[in-house]
Image: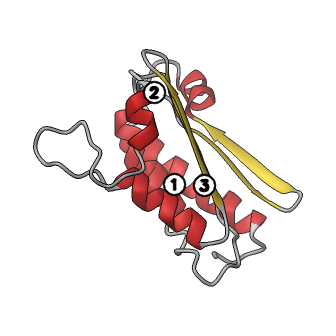
Amino acid sequence: ITIKDDGCGMDKDFLSKVTDPYATTRKTRNVGLGIPLFKMEAEMAGGSFEIDSVLNKGTLVKATFQIHHIDRPPLGDLSDTITALLPACDNCDISLLFKKDKDSFVFDTRELKEQLNGESVSQPYVMQFVKEMLNENILTILGGTIL
């Protein structure tokens, strides 16, 4: 899993402690569990975790999971997750590369937006199309089974 943004980024001091559950920029509570739990899950599943950030430039997070590791959390419903993110994507983009062995497919909201000619990606018919297309491609790549 690779997540990349072009947001505000983190300075080197905060980046050095961002995997600590008690490191957060939030004012409402003094814990931040997202990144520490993501790192823990990847490492428990025999994978790895990397994070790099540049202040005022953005952040890059990479995590790998061994797909058949007994401690890997379930993949979940990827098409539902992507579809749920679409309403927030009129001003941002999502790119998904899904691959297994030598088979792969790419979903990118930039390509979708081009096809829509200014129509919002959060329109119900667009979201339904995306969900069905993702499910079809995922099932094809996985040989008809969801992991």
Checking the image for residue 49, the label placed there is none
| Residue position marked by numbered label 2 in the rendering | 12
Checking the image for residue 134, the label placed there is 3
Q: Secondary structure at mark 1?
A: helix
**Residue located 57% across and 63% down the image:** 42
In the rendered image, the vertical position of residue 74 relative to residue 41, given as above or below:
below
Q: Amino acid at mark 3?
A: Leu
In the picture as drawn, the residue positioned furthest to the left comes out as 28
In the rendered image, the vertical position of residue 55 relative to residue 51, given as above or below:
above
Place of residue 59 in the rendered image (x, y in percent of width and height, measured from the top left): 50, 30
- Is any part of residue 1 visible from this angle? no
Checking the image for residue 131, the label placed there is 1
| Closer-to-camera residue (118/141) | 141
**Residue located 66% across and 63% down the image:** 47
**In this rendering, position of residue 20 left or right of residue 53:** left
Q: Amino acid at mark 2?
A: Lys
Classify residue 25 by image quadrant. top left
N-term mark: 2 or 3: 2
CA separation in Å, label 1 and label 3: 5 Å
**Residue located 58% across and 31% down the image:** 112
Crowd around label 1: few <14 · some 14–19 · many ≥20 (10 Å): some
Q: Secondary structure at mark 2?
A: helix
Place of residue 99 in the rendered image (x, y in percent of width and height, measured from the top left): 76, 56
Place of residue 32 in the rendered image (x, y in percent of width and height, measured from the top left): 28, 50
| Closer-to-camera residue (4/113) | 4
Q: Amino acid at mark 1?
A: Lys
Q: Secondary structure at mark 3?
A: helix
